Amino acid sequence: MNLQKIFKTALDVALLKPAAIKKVAADKGMTKPAFIVIAVASIAYALGFMIFPVTFAGLVIYRPGIEDVVLTAILHFGVMIAGLYILGYLGEQFFKSKVKMDAFVRVMGFASIVGVLALAPKLAVIGGIWQLVIFWKLMKEEGKLDTGAVIALLVLGVIVAAILASVASPYSYW
């Protein structure tokens, strides 16, 4: 699959097109392309902090170097993949979602295209909210979970993400 097709599919998933979501969920060959989309989102996330450094009262108080950007992109990529597999496993095994773990990883991996909004860190919130919308739709419609189960899975997802992020942080004391 070429890059243009990968990103067109990712955009279709992000736009909640049912045919694209079903296609990605069903096609095991879409796993590597999903990882490519996650990698692009991870790089965008890391570059966003370099392009827009942390400021306070108009002064730059932190601008990451290239080594920080590379490390952040790698850690973000790893945490995203681990988090998606854990969340997919929890959804399938404990909440009895009809969406299998691998299909969940593929769909949410393609959905991570909205992470490119993190090139402008203030827009990252919009991308994050939209990923939650995609997650909600996927688990309600394809996973056949009730509202309480989706909320519980979201809460578990936040806990898993916090744990993974703290363990993967270069500043972690683990």
Image (tube, helix red, strand yellow):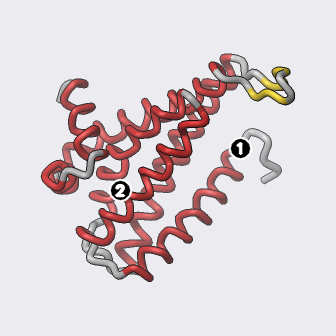
Amino acid type of the residue that numbered disc 2 sits on in the rendered structure: Ile
Depicted 50 relative to depicted 90: above or below:
above
Q: Secondary structure at mark 2?
A: helix
In the drawing, what numbered circle is on residue 169?
1
Q: Residue at x 22, y 55 (%)?
A: 25
Residue 113: image location, x then y, percent: 38, 38
Looking at the image, is mark 2 or mark 1 nearer the viewer? 2
Rendering coords of residue 173 (x, y %): 82, 50
Position of the N terminus by quadrant: top left
Residue at horizontal 40 percent and vertical 43 percent from the top: 112
* Distance between the alpha carbons at the discs numbered 2 and 1: 27 Å
The front one of 79 and 113 is 113
Q: Earlier in the sequence, mark 2 or mark 1?
A: 2
* Horizontal arrangement in the rendering, residue 11 relative to residue 19 (left or right): right
The residue wearing badge 2 is 134
Compared to residue 71, the image places residue 19 above or below, namely below
